[in-house]
Amino acid sequence: MDAADKIAVVEKYVAAFATADMDIIREIYADNARVEDPIGTPVHDGLEAVCAFYEGALKSGAKLALTGKPRCAGNAVAFPFQVNMPGMVIDIIDVFEFNEQGRISSMKAYWGPENIS
Amino acid sequence: MDAADKIAVVEKYVAAFATADMDIIREIYADNARVEDPIGTPVHDGLEAVCAFYEGALKSGAKLALTGKPRCAGNAVAFPFQVNMPGMVIDIIDVFEFNEQGRISSMKAYWGPENIS
């Protein structure tokens, strides 16, 4: 999986929020995906749990904007972004790991109270 | 370990490069630390291997500058930065994981050819 393919997934992820499109979430995540958002909280384990998590996030009206270039390495990409919600902005770094089919097998989100403004 | 302690380690890390100070590297890393820089390349396993890696990096004259706020979550911190070397700038995201003594047990660096300018 080359860097362009990984960056395309990041762009799809941003588009999923922009258009509140759960079909994109189902397309980019693996069946056995694990999402930990933020790190240190209970993991959403498996595509159905992952989709339940995103259904809430997408309904909240959150929109994403990259704040730097995605960094591609090995089977992963890390990228800095802001999530904009009514009355709140959070600076986050996400790390996606991909399986051999190019789907996200692991998503880890790094952010804390200090990143909310 | 609270966020301020993690951010202080990130600041020490930047200072280690600014002053080419290996003592800081030995102070912030755990004895059993693992460094993968970038992701997908062989791991530097254990403090001596980690120090050998940083001796080269510090001698190269590389200097670090944060390009966004550190993101603290769980036992980890992720932060975006630029490394400046003669004739080259690389945009990187590092993730540190800490042990119970507040030392870095795992460092993972995310960057690729697309991040070099």
Image: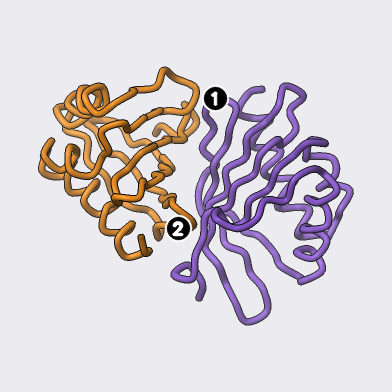
Chain colours: A orange, B purple
- Say whether residue A2 is left or right of residue B75: left
Image position, residue A94 (x, y; %): 41, 42
Q: Secondary structure at mark 2?
A: strand
Read off the residue under disc 1: B74
Quadrant assignment, res B52:
bottom right
The chain containing the residue under callout 2 comes to A
Image x and y of residue A66, in percent: 33, 52
The amino acid type, in three-letter code, at marker 1 is: Gly
Are there few (<14), some (14-19), or many (20+) residues within 10 Å of tag 2? many
- Residue with the mark numbered 2: A71
Task: Quarter of the image for the N terminus of chain B: give it.
Answer: top right
The numbered mark at residue B35 is none
Residue plotted at (70% across, 37% down): B8
Q: Is residue B58 above or below residue A85?
A: below
Residue A87 left/right relative to B43: left
The residue at the point 52 percent across, 44 percent down is B69
| Residue occupying image coordinates x 31% and y 31% | A32
* Left or right for A34, reference A12: right
Residue B47 position, x and y percent, is: 82, 44
Q: Nearer the viewer, residue B70 or A50?
A: A50
Type of residue at label 2? Arg
